[in-house]
Amino acid sequence: MTYQNYSLKQLQQVDAAHHLHPFTDHKELREAGSRIITRAEGPYIFDSEGNEILDAMAGLWCVNVGYGREELARAAYHQMKELPYYNSFFKCSTPTPVLLAKRLAELAPPSVNQVFFGSSGSEANDTALRLVRHFWALEGKPQKNRIISRKNAYHGSTVAGTSLGGMEPMHQQLGGAVPNIVHVMMPYAYELALPGESDHEFGLRAAKAVEDAILEAGPENVAAFIGEPIMGAGGVKIPPMSYWPEIERICRKYDVLLMLDEVITGYGRTGEWFAAQSFGITPDTITTAKALTSGYQPLSALLVGDRIATTLTEKGGEFYHGYTYSGHPVACAVALANLDIIEKEGLVERVKNDTGPYFAQALRERIADHPLVGEVRSFGLMGAIEIVRDKATKERFEGDGRAAVVVRDHAIANGLMLRATGDTMILSPPLIWTRETIDLACERIGKALDLAHKDLF
Ligand code: PLP
């Protein structure tokens, strides 16, 4: 029996009875029923009732080339017929991860040349954590194992990902984090800058929090700093341009490795292949996933810099770590075809020179003045809208995030899928969006804000 034989109500009942969802209150889900998305094309998703919804989240920050790409389906089909699976353990390899690793090394900053594959961003961060600690152990400094991260960071949902991340409610449910990970302030000027402090100064102060944490632990005990170049799930928090170069300087000064989590920003979202290039820094590891296959297959790639890779190779000894699906041939074939599309269609350049600046201008000119909006911000095709009760004082609505949910629900009802996190609306559209798609999105956001305003006052 195919799903077409089920009514929406039946599918919702079966869903509630058998399917546990990620990051979901299952009591609420049972009462509300899930929205069932049944197909998608280009920038649009369609639900079971035939509603067409413009997807301003690219799925979950991942469908960068849009939906319905024949080339990706064909790449998966051919690879499945030829070799659906073989592992890369025990000195084996298959062609597609080899070619993909070479391709990624060519796209990454010059000193990043090795790749470790997994199936998700969380897995890749688990690998990254294990790898940097292993690196320092190989260097004869096993005590140099503390990791510095930021409050409200998101690095995934496995035990390692949750421990690296700085989300308090997740920590509370963890029942014991991976030891020796500390969290410092995030570079979020809208709420944390002091009166009269410039963006530049705030960026340096936020970076100084990392230096303070290194000095408090003693540099001889600190393995690495990890951060998302732009905090995504935490609310698209864009650091001042002074922040990352200062972080890099501090890491180099104290011989602390720099780990970037580019699971969201990788593969074009910021207008460069990697946000490391947007911020002019050279990390020791770059965690990537999502847009590597545009979400058509689960695949992550931890890009590893020469310093770590050289030690790993020259010192030798087995790195006791890996996944059944590390370097999965089908996922890697899809990734190669996806990178072909991004290159052929010039999507990275388009974000940098056309849609990114147009998106920023559209948010500024058409959304920022709305009475519910405290701030708009964007970088490339990643944006946020802060929802406030009072623009001047930045006072929020009571109910912690309730107002943003009202806006989100109106947006979806008016044909725009976006996300609410806390009091922040988030946008992360496919890179195939054009100026016209941005216009349409702004029109629908404006309508949602007007309707929410009526509900909230
Ligand atoms: N790191 C960042 C920055 C993310 O945004 C995410 C997911 O949203 C992850 C890691 C975890 O990736 P996954 O959900 O594929 O495990």
Image (tube, rainbow, N blue to C red):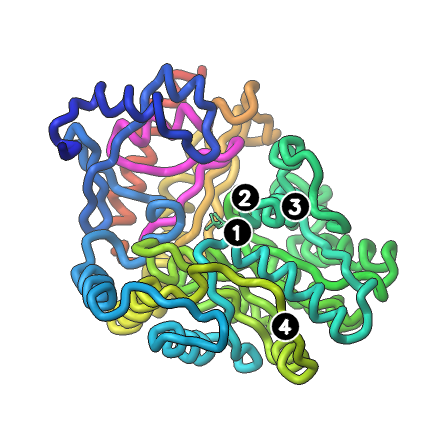
In this figure, which residue is indicated by the disc labeled 2?
157
Instruction: Choose top left, top right, bottom left or bottom right for residue 398.
Output: top right
Looking at marks 3 and 2 on the same chain, the residue that comes earlier in the sequence is marked by: 2
> As drawn, which residue projects farthest toward the bottom?
314
Q: Is mark 1 within 8 Å of ligand 1?
A: yes
Give the x, y percent position of residue 447: 30, 30
Q: Is mark 4 within 8 Å of ligand 1?
A: no
Question: Identity of the amino acid at label 1?
Answer: Ser
Question: Identity of the amino acid at label 3?
Answer: Ser
Which residue is at a point 77% across and 51% down the rendered structure image? 180
Give the x, y percent position of residue 92: 44, 76
Q: In the rendered view, does 215 fall on the left or right side of 252?
A: right
Looking at marks 2 and 4 on the same chain, the residue that comes earlier in the sequence is marked by: 2
Magenta span of residues: 403-431
Which residue is at a point 30% across and 31% down the rendered structure image? 412
SS type, badge 4: loop
SS type, badge 3: helix
SS type, badge 2: loop
Question: Identity of the amino acid at label 4?
Answer: Glu
Q: Quick one: quadrant of the C terminus?
A: top left
For the residue pair 78 and 356, the one nearer the viewer reads as: 78
Mark 3 closeness class: few <14, some 14–19, many ≥20 residues within 10 Å = many
Looking at marks 1 and 3 on the same chain, the residue that comes earlier in the sequence is marked by: 1
Q: In the rendered view, does 354 fall on the left or right side of 255?
A: left
Question: Identity of the amino acid at label 2?
Answer: Ser
Report how far apart the C-alphas of labels 1 and 3 lie in the structure.
11 Å
User: Mark 2 and mark 3 in contact (Cβ < 8 Å)?
Assistant: no
Report how far apart the C-alphas of labels 3 and 2 lie in the structure.
9 Å
Question: Which mark, by number, is residue 163?
Answer: 3
Give the x, y percent position of residue 215: 86, 59
In this figure, which residue is indicated by the disc labeled 1?
122
In this figure, which residue is indicated by the disc labeled 4?
318
